[in-house]
Image: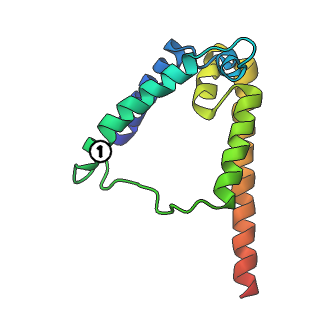
Amino acid sequence: MARHLIALIAGGIFGFGLSLSHMVDPNKVLDFLDLPGTWDPSLALVMGGALAVTAVTFPLILRRPMPLFDQRFHMPTTTAVDTRLLGGAALFGLGWGLSGYCPGPALGAIVVNWQEGVPFVAAVVIGGMAVDFYELSRTARATADG
């Protein structure tokens, strides 16, 4: 139960930060990408701040024997750069650049701009389910083939 409460608090802080920095407004992202037009560097400043905090705290946190509210750290086991990673990154970037939303700010946008936030989050959920379905059927085919 404590893990869920901590996750809720962390998510609330994250959402508050996104709202405070206006990153739930897709125009902030789209203006950041519009270099010759209405360029707005604030996204780079928000990302730079997040990177600075992460660069300092992540190594310190990983020195601990285990997280505060779990039995182990859940780190990626695959480090390969393959077509699935590149395709997913390209799809994410394309969706972000076209809509101005990524999943975190889109959840925040549900509260302040539900007409855009809800369809985007629904599309993310449906896309994730489609990938899961594809992976399950691919695994089932590979198992059936021997």
Q: Position of residue 146 (x, y in %)?
A: 71, 88
Residue 10's x, y, as percent?
A: 40, 30
Left or right relative to 138: residue 107: left
Q: Amino acid at mark 1?
A: Pro
At 75% from the left and 13% from the top, the residue drawn is 37
* Quadrant of the rendered image containing residue 139: bottom right
Residue bearing the label numbered 1:
59
Q: Residues within 10 Å of mark 1 (few under 14, many from 20)?
A: few
Q: Secondary structure at mark 1?
A: helix
From this view, report whether residue 106 is shown above or below residue 135.
above
Residue 40 visible (yes or no): yes
Q: Quadrant of residue 98?
A: top right
The residue at the point 32 percent across, 50 percent down is 70
- Judge whether residue 122 can be spotted in this image: no
Quadrant location of residue 109?
top right
In this picture, residue 22 sits left or right of residue 113: left
Rendered location of residue 117, percent (x, y): 70, 24
